[in-house]
Image (cartoon, rainbow, N blue to C red):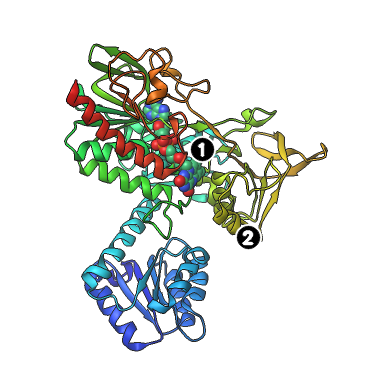
Amino acid sequence: MSDERRRPAIVAVDDEEVVLSAIARDLRRGFGERYRIVRANSGDEGLDVLRELLRRGDQVALLLADQRMPGLTGTDYLVRAREMAPSAKRVLLTAYADTEAAIQAINEVSLDYYLLKPWDPPEEQLFPVVDDLLSSWEAGAALEAGGVRLIGHRFSRASHDLRDFLARNRVPARWLDVERDAEAKQLLKVASVDDDRLPVALLEDGTVLERPTVLELAERLGIAGQPASEHYDLVIVGGGPAGLAAAVYGASEGLKTIMVEREAPGGQAGQSSRIENYLGFPNGLSGSDLARRATDQARRLGAELLTLQDASRLRVEGSGRIIELTGGSSLSASSVLVASGVSYRQLEVPGFPELTGQGIYYGAALTEARDCRNQHVAVIGGANSAGQAAVFFSKYAQQVTMLVRGDSLTKSMSHYLIEQIEALDNVEVRTHTEAVGAEGDGRLRALRVRDADGSESTMDVDACFVFIGAVPRTDWLEGVVARDERGFILAGLDAKADGWPLQRDPFPLETSVPGVLVAGDVRARSIKRVASAVGEGSMAVSLVHQYLAES
Ligand SMILES: Cc1cc2nc3c(=O)[nH]c(=O)nc-3n(C[C@H](O)[C@H](O)[C@H](O)COP(=O)(O)OP(=O)(O)OC[C@H]3O[C@@H](n4cnc5c(N)ncnc54)[C@H](O)[C@@H]3O)c2cc1C
């Protein structure tokens, strides 16, 4: 294949020759070395071009179309193009007068950006935007092309945990289902691995890991590192939005900062398919993209990130604060920020514990989406996270059924999500309904469902995603830091009541232990939102400065 063919394509569509030539020229100037710029004069021609590129196996990175065109409008074209190339970034070119149409298109086609004409100077108006979109496309493409090959059974919990770990830590990897992919069988034969030794991870250096634990795989991939120092100005526990924000601010303001994360940076937000209400991202962004950006930013500014390490105890020794880690090592700190968020609550009804990871998943488990193609998926819960999951899985599954205990979604879900759900033909919302059991034979086959009148029925499903609230996991702080009856950590004046030792009042985010602060969802009475977690994480750093200045 020639080099010209191998470069990923950017497809630009406009019926006005002058505009098309200008945008193609500028795109070529900015990105021509790495990307091939392909032009089309109408929406229909654009679809033909796209079809041909995909038929030849070319990658398509970005689709750009003018909104005002005879025949297919830019939005119409992007709706159809998205079905053919779902991972390509989508940009609408609009006149100022068409801004309203562009904003509408954000939902209709999950638009990534709308670009106002004229885009002069391109160095300011065009290049930074396209560069940013291409970077996130490249990150996704690299992940899918992936170095690690993981082979296993789809309905095996061990396979699911490894897949989830690789995806959430953004390790380039390819999943091969031994029952569906012929390549999986061949690879197992070459590597001389028996079926009963699955899951197996084939690494780029030729290493074959049979039935590895997540930690073993992480260690072989060099993800589970060791701290570089023994003492830090600030140790952050938890790498969700609150912890990441604190890492960015701590490091950028000269504090020697380390963030300890048990699973993967991004926390709950990292599992969101699309965050639409975070300020500054009018087109929404995926949680994985937010986590990637924040992690890069924290590292670039000098924060150390320690993943797959679990804080298991906090010790107070004079002015020192010691965080013990589950592996046996510990970190000494002048100050600590607890940003450990919340974890999904488990559904304690028959069949659910046994079938978890085998068709039942807590959280969005985005890695499962592709395997749900043409299947029936149930989503349990009526809050925003469940709504997002229903919208997301509707793109893959044949049918999505939401099981909601309350009488409507309005009390628990944001208006924008309710509107999106109502517009989807393949999403059914069953209110006054709860799951009372799960049935299966090594994999989920059906849910037992109870309706408002108390009658029970069986519903055949292939996968079930559960979002029934979350609880803080703060047992490791028992007896050291004051918590409320549900385990959320008290801060500020609430924490003072509990044997506060200093003359001054605690700072607003300070816990009952001076110099130990709390931010985000784990704080008692916090607002459970990405923006508030980010705000508190940032604010905590300025309070750490005040604490260090006076101690
Ligand atoms: C599916 C989903 C979609 C959502 N969508 C939106 C949305 O669109 N908009 C919005 O505003 N909010 C949304 N939310 C809520 C939002 O994600 C949370 O409010 C936010 O992530 C809270 O951030 P946090 O940093 O406080 O905690 P978390 O995000 O919970 O992160 C805490 C981190 O700490 C780690 N951790 C816990 N204990 C330890 C320990 N002992 N040692 C080391 N690490 C530990 C965890 O592994 C986790 O990564 C969504 C939530 C979910 C689940």
* Residue type marked 2: Leu
| Residue 400: percent from left, percent from top | 65, 51
Mark 1, residue position: 160
Quick one: 533 or 157, which is closer to the camera?
Answer: 533
Q: In this rendering, would 460 be left or right of 29?
A: right
Residue 417, which numbered label?
none
The label nearer to you, 1 versus 2, is 2
Q: In this rendering, would 260 be left or right of 422?
A: left
Q: Secondary structure at mark 1?
A: helix
Quarter the N terminus occupies:
bottom left
Near mark 2 (Cα within 10 A), the count class, few <14, some 14-19 or many ≥20, is some
Give the answer, above or below, for where 22 lies relative to 376: below
- At a point 34% along the width and 56% down the height, the residue shown is 136
Give the answer, above or below, for where 291 lies relative to 499: below
| Residue 274: percent from left, percent from top | 47, 52
Q: Quadrant of ligand 1?
A: top left
State which tag comes first along the sequence, 1 or 2: 1
Q: Secondary structure at mark 2?
A: loop
- At a point 70% along the width and 28% down the height, the residue shown is 350
* Residue type marked 1: His
| Residue 228: percent from left, percent from top | 20, 28
Mark 2, residue position: 424
